[in-house]
């Protein structure tokens, strides 16, 4: 009887076995019978239509089946195990599990599934095992977490998963707090290895889930590795230091800017977030941007975007929108720009500059005032009280436009010593980049509590920017300059108006080339000096050798001719003209002998009394 059951039993009882499959019956421990149907025909392209109704285990393996139509197994109400391994499956119907209320295992490894109908699991409430190993799944949707709560085994290894949804991780993390009974198997076995995980902030919860040991969860392979970014490829999750994801948050800043016509405006916006947000600019009225955008990230992780608007016009006025965006959301802020008319010049017919220009001595100073005032713009520094001490040199008192140019009778009433003590001198430019410059100065009579202000602007603009320098410092670096542009900069004691000798005009392209130019000048000077000095040195040496040769060949006494050369002197002739005269041999010998310089001078004085003779 058992042999008859193995061959399939009476076919008319539960339906005939498909011709392409093999069927068998086996007796379970409770005495009931279970039928197993195995189909492995490589030419099979669809699931068999006539499967015995009492089948409890159906295996369709290594066939050419590419898709499973809806309700293909609806009549198999007693089916508990459905195995579809190593076929060509690439499409599954959302109704494929309809009617399988007793299904406990669904194994589909080694197929070509790029997606899985997770909602179909609702038709199999008793499902405990789901094996999707070695498919092509690239993502698990967040809604899949609702249908995986009853599983005790889930294998997603060897797919194309980059990350897992937070909803699914939350379901697994909840198992950490569940009760655990000793002697029982783990509530959940997970297979997540061999996937190309992207190790960014979105993997934060999974990494910490793997680090936290839980008796209710087991892993087929716990040493998961990163595949990207490239800097983390091959790194084990346990060695990662990831940050939790955060939505963009804008940093507070200026919301309204007023700038004169023709000036350069720099709009700045910063934001934080994990991952770093993408920053962008747009105009509220939809018009295109009339400027350049620069992106940078500071050392504290803040993302900055800078919008530079050169030579603004009235068309640039309006609202500018700065947006920071990452996958968690976006944040925006509004910056208003108002372009104003340039302030009128202080050179009016009745102003102090005009009154000064009418004085005879100050005419030249007034002309110089007009030139400087045209290029040094306005800075709202506090006004200095003006009374009338005696007028110093006119050019020393030339102040800048919009600093209330003073006439000779309107100078400060502060003591002369106090003003002199607060004077900045020796202002120099020592910068070396196209976008920054360093200013150094001296203030020898300023105290340790004296603070300075540095005012600078593009040459020809009216408004100047101010940089506050704390007490005790005599240098400052100005950054954010426009390359290949001419600038004017002034340094003065805070609260005072700069004088013309406290200002300097420089160019960002000349500053960079100055050092190279100086080195070139030095090389040229040294080369010229070497060309001139070398022949003279050789001439002197050759002359000395020639005289020594003549001395050696002469028959005179060694004392008279042994170590002497003729000496020439520059003297005056009888008619007053300069000429070269030659001493006698004995006198030259005495001058160049080994005697002291004092004896030689005495001999020279006795030889001649001419006052215009000079000796070596």
Image (cartoon, rainbow, N blue to C red):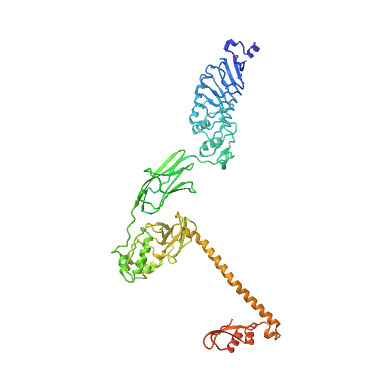
Q: How far across and how far down the image is residue 267, in percent?
A: 41, 49
Residue pictured at 38% horizontal, 51% vertical:
312
Asked where in the image residue 579 lies, by quadrant, the reply is bottom right
Relative to 31, say whether 230 is above or below.
below
How far across and down, in percent of the image, does residue 561 sit?
68, 84
Front in this rendered view, residue 212 or 196:
196
Residue pictured at 65% horizontal, 78% vertical: 544
Q: In the image, is 310 to the left or to the right of 101?
A: left
Residue under the point 56% across and 18% down: 79
Tell me: 10 left or right of 304: right
Answer left or right for 85 relative to 370. Answer: right
Residue 162 location in percent, x, y? 54, 35
Residue 121 vertical placement versus 530 (above, below): above
**Residue 12 seen anywhere in this rendered image of the structure:** yes
Q: In this view, does 415 lie to the left or right of 236?
A: left
Quadrant in the rendering for residue 218: top right
Quadrant of the image for the N terminus? top right
């Amino acid at each position: 009887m058992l042999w008859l059951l193995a061959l399939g039993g009476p076919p008319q009882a539960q339906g005939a076995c498909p011709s392409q499959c093999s069927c068998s019956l086996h007796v379970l421990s409770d005495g009931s019978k279970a039928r197993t149907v195995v189909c492995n025909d490589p030419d099979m392209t669809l699931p068999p239509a006539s499967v015995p109704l009492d089948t409890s285990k159906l295996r369709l393996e290594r066939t050419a089946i590419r898709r499973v139509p809806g309700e293909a197994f609806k009549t198999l109400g007693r089916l508990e195990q459905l195995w579809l391994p190593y076929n060509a499956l690439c499409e599954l119907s959302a109704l494929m599990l309809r009617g399988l209320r007793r299904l406990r295992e669904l194994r589909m490894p080694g197929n070509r599934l790029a997606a899985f109908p997770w909602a179909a699991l609702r038709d199999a409430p008793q499902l405990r095992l789901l094996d999707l190993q070695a498919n092509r799944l690239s993502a698990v949707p967040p809604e899949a977490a609702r249908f995986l709560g009853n599983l005790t085994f889930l294998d997603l290894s060897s797919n194309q998963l980059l990350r897992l949804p937070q909803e699914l991780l939350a379901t697994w993390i909840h198992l950490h707090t569940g009760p655990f009974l000793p002697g029982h198997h783990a509530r959940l076995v997970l297979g997540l290895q061999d996937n190309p995980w992207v190790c960014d902030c979105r993997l934060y919860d999974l990494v910490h889930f793997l680090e936290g040991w839980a008796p209710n969860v087991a892993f087929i392979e716990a040493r998961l590795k990163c595949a990207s970014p490239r800097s983390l490829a091959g790194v084990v999750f346990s060695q990662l230091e990831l940050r939790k994801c955060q939505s963009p948050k804008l940093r507070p800043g200026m919301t309204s800017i007023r700038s004169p016509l023709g000036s350069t405006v720099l709009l700045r916006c910063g934001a934080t977030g994990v991952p770093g947000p993408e920053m962008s600019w747009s105009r509220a009225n939809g018009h295109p941007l009339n400027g350049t955008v620069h992106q940078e990230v500071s050392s504290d992780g803040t993302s900055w975007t800078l919008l530079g608007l050169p030579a603004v016009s009235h068309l640039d006025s309006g609202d500018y929108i700065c947006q920071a965006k990452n996958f968690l959301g976006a944040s925006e802020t509004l910056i208003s720009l108002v372009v104003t008319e340039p302030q009128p010049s202080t050179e009016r017919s009745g102003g102090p500059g005009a009154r000064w220009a009418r004085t005879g001595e100050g005419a030249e100073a007034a002309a110089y005032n007009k030139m400087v005032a045209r290029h040094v713009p306005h800075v709202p520094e506090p006004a200095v009280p003006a009374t009338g001490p005696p007028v110093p040199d006119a050019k020393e008192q030339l102040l800048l436009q919009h600093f209330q140019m003073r006439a000779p009778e309107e100078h400060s009433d502060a003591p002369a010593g106090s003003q002199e003590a607060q004077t900045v001198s020796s202002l120099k430019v020592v910068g070396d980049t196209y976008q920054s410059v360093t200013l150094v100065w001296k203030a020898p009579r300023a105290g340790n509590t004296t603070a300075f202000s540095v005012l600078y602007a593009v040459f020809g603009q009216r408004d100047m920017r101010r940089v506050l320098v704390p007490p005790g410092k005599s240098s400052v670096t100005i950054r954010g300059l426009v390359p290949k542009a001419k600038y004017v900069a002034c340094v003065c004691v805070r609260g005072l108006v700069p004088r013309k000798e406290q200002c300097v005009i420089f160019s960002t392209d000349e500053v960079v080339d100055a050092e190279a130019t100086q080195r070139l000048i030095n090389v040229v000077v040294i080369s010229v000096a070497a060309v001139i000095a070398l022949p003279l040195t050789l001439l002197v040496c050759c002359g000395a050798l020639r005289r020594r040769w003549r001395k050696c060949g002469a028959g005179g006494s060694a004392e008279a001719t042994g170590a002497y050369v003729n000496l020439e002197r520059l003297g005056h002739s009888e008619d007053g003209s300069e000429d070269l005269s030659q001493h006698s041999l004995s006198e030259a010998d005495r001058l160049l002998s080994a005697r002291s310089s004092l004896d030689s001078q005495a001999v020279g004085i006795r030889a001649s009394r001419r006052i215009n003779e000079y000796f070596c």
